[in-house]
Image (cartoon, rainbow, N blue to C red):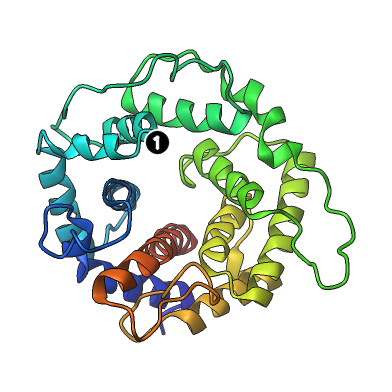
Amino acid sequence: MASPLDRLSDGALDWLGGSLDHFDPYSSSAPSATHTKAKAALELALLCHCAARLDSAPGSLAGAADLVRALWQRPDFPDLFDVHPGHASSYWLIYKALAPAGIDGTPMRLSPGFLSPHGKSAYQRIEIRYYADKAGVRHGIEPYAGLVPLSPLVAHPEPEASEPGHTEPLAAPQAYALTHTAFYLSDFGRTDPGLTGDVTAHARDLVRRMLDHCVAHDRWDLAAELLLTEFILGTDPLRTPSGAAAAECLARAQLPDGSIPGRSAALRASGSDTAADFFSKAYHTTLVTALMALIVSSERAS
């Protein structure tokens, strides 16, 4: 019998594979969509990159990998980065880092000082270092050993006792910084994140509290990221009460077509949404769920 994670990943991958026209900025389905088209394509590239490193990459991602390769071969694709100037340098660096084998792509155009540590938080420096190292780009960011003590995994204080009616241990930006820091330090679960025992215990407690909150409030996107973070921190998510509850929460949210219809129940797509609007609301959480389930289920089986 397939595990809950296998069922989540199979359904999510089926939906993603059937939605590639919305990921393609040049498809006739894309112009009416409200999502950031370059970001969606870069996220698809990250999924393909991580899945390709697994012992058994799912064949259902073959079409996605073909689309990513085709986009990276288009010299006009990076022009989409400039539509969002506040994120353009980050998009350029991710584009370089995730280039399919044998494709150099268009030379990067980074804003001055982007690869310098000055004026950036520890989390921003970790993110830049991760993609710059993967891209083989020279940078001035300090080693991870100096960044970990300043990172969200360490620097977030112990949550205080919740006030009545407020159970969120971390604000959403803090929680996403926590999960993404774990992703980068571990190369999405491939390496040890380099944390000490006390730091790991602290981070696990934050993850547990946030997972409980996400389950209680049906915050699906963050639940998927926290499940992967729990795995990165050395636990089997399906063997912890908070992790098992979060997996069940995602399974309840998953529609028969395999999609997760939004970042949360409060933000879910409605029956009146167009196909483009549904994609805009559903694609990120569905993709993150697929990524989490693929990585965790692959490692659990090995």
Above/below status of 103 relative to 33 = above
Identify the residue at horizontal 63%, vertical 68% (top origin).
243
> Residue 165 appears at what percent x and percent y?
82, 73
State left or right for residue 165 relative to residue 282.
right
Q: Quadrant of the N terminus?
A: bottom left
State left or right for residue 1 relative to residue 82.
right
The quarter of the picture where residue 227 lies is bottom right
Q: Residues within 10 Å of mark 1 (few under 14, many from 20)?
A: few
Identify the residue at horizontal 75%, vertical 42% (top origin).
156
State left or right for residue 225 relative to residue 153.
left
Identify the residue at horizontal 34%, vertical 19% (top origin).
137
User: For this rendering, which residue is in front, 141 or 143?
Assistant: 141
User: For this rendering, which residue is in front, 216 or 109?
Assistant: 109
Identify the residue at horizontal 33%, vertical 21% (top origin).
110
> Residue 275 appears at what percent x and percent y?
25, 75
Residue 66 visible, this angle: yes
Query: Which kind of residue does numbered mark 1 sit on?
Result: His
